[in-house]
Amino acid sequence: MARILKAILLMILSQGAAIAIEEPAFTIESQTAHYDIRLYPSMLVAETRIEAGFDEAGTRGFRILADYIFGNNQSRTKMAKPLFATQEAPREKIAMTAPVGLVQSPWGFLVQFTMPTSFKLATLPKPNDARVHLREIPERRIAVLRYSGSWSEDRYQKKRKELVAALKEEGVQAIGDPCFARFNSPFMPWFLRRNEIWIEVAP
């Protein structure tokens, strides 16, 4: 049994190493025992608002945005195939990126996909689904706490509180809402997942 588990783990790790998913570039300005302060340049996102609880919002939002990047848009331009492809009429597809962001608000959650840097706001294909919105987020300074494990709300809330407490203790002013950043597919075993809590902070 141990040999079989080891073989499965090696297969998962080798697949992860072979598949390159674009992530937003950043500069690390400082590090503590609990978090990093990163400077992120402006980035494009596709986002959708979901009025639902934590788990349902993430699932519904992911499906809506995945449908957009896999071709449910108004462009007919041919592009290279993304990591995951479906057999359908030719429509423009956008490469997968990471992370998937989940931001809580009074009405529910905002789910975001970061768009590839090869696009500008004017060149992104227009969504067919009115629930998908495109916008550019300006340069931000973000406090980031990284952790592994499940995507459960309980674990997210625990890590969020840890980051908020650490920032308060060290006199760092938070100016943005917490964002749950997920970097792996749902098929990645929970113990190998990379998760981050993002909070925008003042200079």
Image: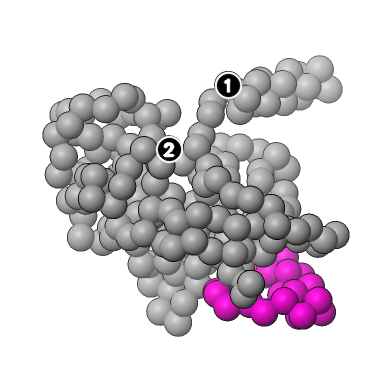
On the image, the x and y values in percent for residue 69 come to 32, 42
Name the secondary structure under disc 1. Answer: helix
Q: Nearer the viewer, residue 174 or 2?
A: 174
* Residue type marked 1: Ala
What is the number of the mark on residue 18?
A: 1
Please tell me whether residue 130 is drawn above or below residue 185 in the rendered image.
below
Displayed quadrant of residue 146: bottom right
Circle 2 SS class: loop
Q: Specify the segment rendered in magenta.
A: 156-177
The residue depicted at 23 percent of the width and 34 percent of the height is 92
Q: Quadrant of the N terminus?
A: top right
> Relative to 119, is 176 above or below?
below
Q: Residues within 10 Å of mark 2 (few under 14, many from 20)?
A: many
Say left or right for 171 vs 16: right
* Residue 184: image location, x then y, percent: 57, 42
Q: Are marks 2 and 1 in contact (CB under 8 Å)?
A: no
Which residue sits at x=52%, y=46%? 24
Q: Is residue 175 magenta?
A: yes
Q: Is residue 7 visible?
A: yes
Mark 2 vs mark 1, CA separation in Å = 14 Å
Residue at 63% x, 50% y: name it. Answer: 27
Q: Position of residue 101 (x, y in %)?
A: 50, 57
Task: Examine the rendering and report whether any part of residue 197 can be seen.
Answer: no
Dominant SS of magenta comes to helix
**First in sequence: mark 2 or mark 1?**
1
- Please name whichever residue, 120 or 98, is drawn nearer the observer in this view of the structure: 120
Counting from the top left corner in percent of width and height, residue 177 is at: 55, 74
On the image, numbered disc 2 is attached to which residue? 96
Magenta residue check for 85? no
- Disc on res. 196: none
